[in-house]
Amino acid sequence: MKAKKTALAKAILSLNNEKECLDFLEDMCTIKEIEDMASRLEIAKLLSEGKTFVDVERETGASSATISRVNRCLKHGGGYRMVLERIDDE
């Protein structure tokens, strides 16, 4: 499985711009999967801005389970924070 994840990471890293990324995502994922990932990123952004679970649930319509999972990743992972810092710099 690790080889498959590595191949996916390499594929993503080969993309040169937003259009290429969106084209790739639309080929790889269902519309729902893309929407779910975009929603999780928005949840991470709101939580990192200090919004409460209730605020995030109200603003996004996400379930408390999804919000909790994203929050756990924000606290114990590094991916969301790294990406949020990078896109804030743009």
Image (cartoon, rainbow, N blue to C red):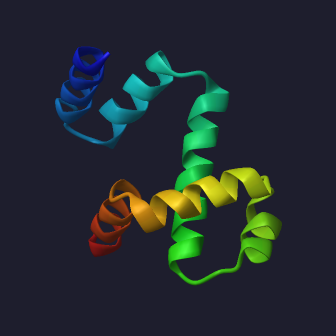
At 67% from the left edge and 30% from the top edge, which residue is drawn? 32
Q: Quadrant of the C terminus?
A: bottom left
Residue farthest along the bottom direction in this orientation: 50
Q: Quadrant of residue 4?
A: top left
At 38% from the left edge and 57% from the top edge, which residue is drawn? 77
Judged left or right of residue 39, residue 4 is left
Q: Is residue 50 above or below residue 54?
A: below
Q: Quadrant of the N terminus?
A: top left
Residue 58: x and y, percent? 82, 68
Q: Is residue 18 above or below residue 14?
A: below
At 27% from the left edge and 74% from the top edge, which residue is drawn? 89
In front here: 58 or 16? 58
Q: Is residue 18 above or below residue 24?
A: below
Residue 45: x and y, percent? 52, 68
Judged left or right of residue 18, residue 46 is right
The answer to whether one can see residue 62 in this image is no
| Number of numbered labels in the structure image | 0
Judged left or right of residue 66, residue 46 is left
At 74% from the left edge and 60% from the top edge, which residue is drawn? 60
Residue 23: x and y, percent? 40, 26
Q: Is residue 60 above or below residue 19?
A: below
The answer to whether one can see residue 8 in this image is yes
Residue 38: x and y, percent? 56, 47
